[in-house]
């Protein structure tokens, strides 16, 4: 029952983290003059408007049940870079808006934890509240660092965009469109295939332990 409760807490933490992440992309694009997300109703905080069957439901469920870091993705909020006055600056700002929102949510969760007396054994806050705050901060940090990887189609790849010659930009957008399924196959199938051979190869796990987990431990030094 305790494990099931933790599972529910993780899912409740993941939903706002991923929804606000995606809305942030559309909101920044809107501020830069792109009406696409707003015209399609994607600036809404309604989770149903952002659900991707695999990325928002199946993948986080698998990770939560497995006890690993919970992350995933929602339906990308559409934007049209042709509306940006400076397409390269617009791409960078729109791309980094999602990870920035996760950083702010993580810091907000840490601030709330501080206001309720922390999450350690001496804290008087209910265990459910402490579990929620720790997982909320951790999940947001995981989403932030994961999406900051400079690999298409993740948000971090937007920092590469300013260095792409103009004639290759259409090819770049094609790569982003089809890279996500390939990326997740490599990320999850390679470690599994390696484990069948008795090898431990988990670059994403190593990366998140060095970043999101260490930062969470720094925020919550229990």
Image: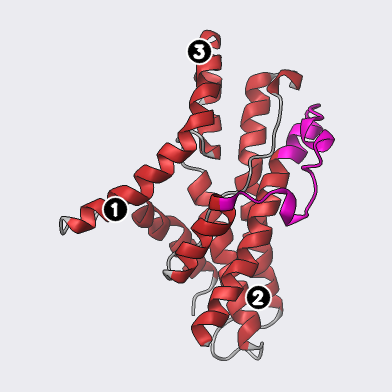
Q: Secondary structure at mark 2?
A: helix
Q: Earlier in the sequence, mark 3 or mark 1?
A: 3
Q: Nearer the viewer, mark 1 or mark 2?
A: 1
Alpha-carbon span between mark 1 and mark 2: 35 Å
Q: Is residue 66 left or right of residue 165?
A: left
Query: Picture coordinates of residue 8 (x, y %)?
Result: 59, 74
Please, what secondary structure does the residue beneath circle 3 have? Answer: helix
Q: Is residue 41 magenta?
A: yes
Q: Is residue 16 above or below residue 96?
A: below
Which residue bears the numbered disc 2? 113
The residue most toward the front is: 53
- Where does residue 101 sit, x and y in percent of width and height? 67, 50
Question: Residue 120 got which mark?
Answer: none
For image coordinates 51% across by 43% down, the residue present is: 148
For label 1, the SS is: helix
Of all residues, the one furthest to the top in this rendering is 167
Instruction: Please rate how many residues cluster around mark 2, counting C-alpha atoms within 10 Å: few if below 14, some from 14 to 19, many from 20.
Output: many
Label 3 and label 1: CA atoms lie apart by 32 Å
Residue 118 visible here: no
Q: CB atoms at circles 3 and 2 under 8 Å apart?
A: no
Residue 4 spot, x, y in % from top left? 53, 81
Q: Nearer the viewer, mark 3 or mark 1?
A: 1
Of 86 and 7, which appears nearest the observer? Answer: 7
Count numbered badges in the picture: 3
Residue 10 vs residue 95, the one in the foreground: 10
Question: Which residue is at 57% across, 91% downward?
Answer: 122
Mark 2 or mark 3, which is nearer the start of the sequence? 2
Using the image as rendered, state which of residue 18 and residue 92 is in the foreground.
18
User: Over which residues does the magenta segment extend?
Assistant: 26-53
Residue designated by label 1: 191
Query: Dot 3 corresponds to which residue?
Result: 168
């Amino acid at each position: 029952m305790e494990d099931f409760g933790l599972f529910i807490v993780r899912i409740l933490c993941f939903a706002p983290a991923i929804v606000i992440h995606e809305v942030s992309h559309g909101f920044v694009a809107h501020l830069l003059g792109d009406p696409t997300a707003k015209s399609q109703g994607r600036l809404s905080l309604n989770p149903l408007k952002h659900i991707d069957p695999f990325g928002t439901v199946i993948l986080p469920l698998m990770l939560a049940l497995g006890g690993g870091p919970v992350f995933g993705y929602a339906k990308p909020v559409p934007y049209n870079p042709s509306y940006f006055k400076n397409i390269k600056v617009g791409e960078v700002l729109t791309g980094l808006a999602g990870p920035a929102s996760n950083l702010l949510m993580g810091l907000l969760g840490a601030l709330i934890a501080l206001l309720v007396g922390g999450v350690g054994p001496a804290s008087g806050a209910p265990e459910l509240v402490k579990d929620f705050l720790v997982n909320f901060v951790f999940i947001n940090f995981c989403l932030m660092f994961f999406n900051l990887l400079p690999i298409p189609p993740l948000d971090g790849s937007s920092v590469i965009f300013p260095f792409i010659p103009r004639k290759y930009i259409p090819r770049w957008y094609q790569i982003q469109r089809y890279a996500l399924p390939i990326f997740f196959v490599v990320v999850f199938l390679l470690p599994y295939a390696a484990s069948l051979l008795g090898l431990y190869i988990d670059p994403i796990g190593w990366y998140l332990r060095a970043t999101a987990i260490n930062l969470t431990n720094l925020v919550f030094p229990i």
